[in-house]
Amino acid sequence: MHLYMRIFFTCLILALCSLTITGQKASRMPQFEEYIKKYKTLAMQQQKEYKIPASITLAQGLLESGAGNSRLAVKANNHFGIKCKEEWRGGRIYHDDDAKNECFRAYKSAEDSYRDHSIFLANRKYYVSLFTLDIYDYKAWAYGLQNCGYATDKSYGDKLVRLIETYELYKLDRLKQPAEKKKPAALVDDIYEIKVVSPEQRKQHPAVTNWRRRIQRVNGIHYIKAQENDSFEIIAYDTKLSLKRLLKYNEVTPGYVLKKGDMLFLQSKERYAPKENRIHVVAAGESMHGIAQLYGMRLKTLYKLNKLQNDYTPKLGDTLKLRK
């Protein structure tokens, strides 16, 4: 680590420790204000998608990355100090932490780091209790993270609260989410995986042999693919989404039978397909629902754009509009 970075982190730690002990209000650091300005939109997007307070995400990013100046952040875009863990299949960087030369996750961008941090919290059993907390209660979240074991620092919660209050990050939790940029149409592997660990689920569904799920994106929306003998109940359990919400996101009713390879969205779909996809030529065996899923767009919009009734069955060679 370069000398200036060591000095920066030493000053940061001393300042936070002093605040924790004295309870005095901190003077704002320009580096921290720049970081907040740069990444606040990302933090707000995580709140919208994963119900994690933007204030908590930003405070963790500030603390874990030293306002983006840590070696992990600079060299690997890792803003939250997340270690590899057994399920990680992405890039890696090795860094001394609790032990020498530990494996940490490396990302292509800060955006990937922020998203993976949200997925990391949302899909690990240790943090389930956090999602029962009031999203506007940043203190409960800060101390909850500490109690759940996110960091070994016994004053971790205090430091997060001090950062949130010094920089008034709690205001972001109540701001309206800014419009997101549209994502490209191509299916993108995010290389994030979730792993089912419940023995009860394994026992109830012995035919399921692959208990890992790869999270991908289309039209900017996260989805997974159904496995052999899959069900919405199992997927709801794996992803920690309610069954009602999962059915709503995918515009199906209870009792819908999944086939291997079906796309299942974990968020609300966009109204239209991506800008690059203005029309779709129907292939053999395709349904209106399947076409809507393919582009991450709402089924209702697909019918409306093409002035079709809900009982319409697409025919081979039909051309359907996907955007206005």
Image (tube, helix red, strand yellow):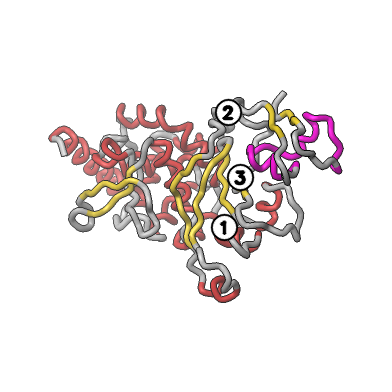
Residue 44 in view, yes or no: yes
Placement of 26 over or under 278, stated as above or below: below
Q: Amino acid at mark 2?
A: Ala
- Is residue 255 found left or right of 175 in the rendered image? right
Q: Amino acid at mark 1?
A: Lys
- Quadrant into which the N terminus falls: top left
Label 3 with label 2: CB-CB less than 8 Å = no
Placement of 38 over or under 88, stated as above or below: above
Q: Nearer the viewer, mark 3 or mark 2?
A: 3
Mark with earlier residue (1, 2):
2
Residue 140 in view, yes or no: no
Residue 240: numbered disc: 1
Give me the C-alpha separation between circle 3 and circle 1.
12 Å
Q: Amino acid at mark 3?
A: Gln
Please name the residue shown 19% across and 41% down the image.
10
Check disc 2 and report its element: helix, strand or loop. Answer: loop
Please name the residue shown 26% across and 37% down the image.
75
Q: Position of residue 320 (x, y in %)?
A: 74, 31
Residue range corresponding to the magenta coloring: 288-311
Residue that numbered label 2 is attached to? 179
Q: Position of residue 66 (x, y in %)?
A: 28, 38
Residue that numbered label 3 is attached to? 267
Give me the C-alpha separation between circle 3 and circle 2.
16 Å
Is disc 2 surrounded by few (<14), some (14 to 19) or many (20+) residues within 10 Å?
A: few
Mark with earlier residue (3, 2):
2
Q: Position of residue 232 (x, y in %)?
A: 65, 59
Residue 4: numbered disc: none
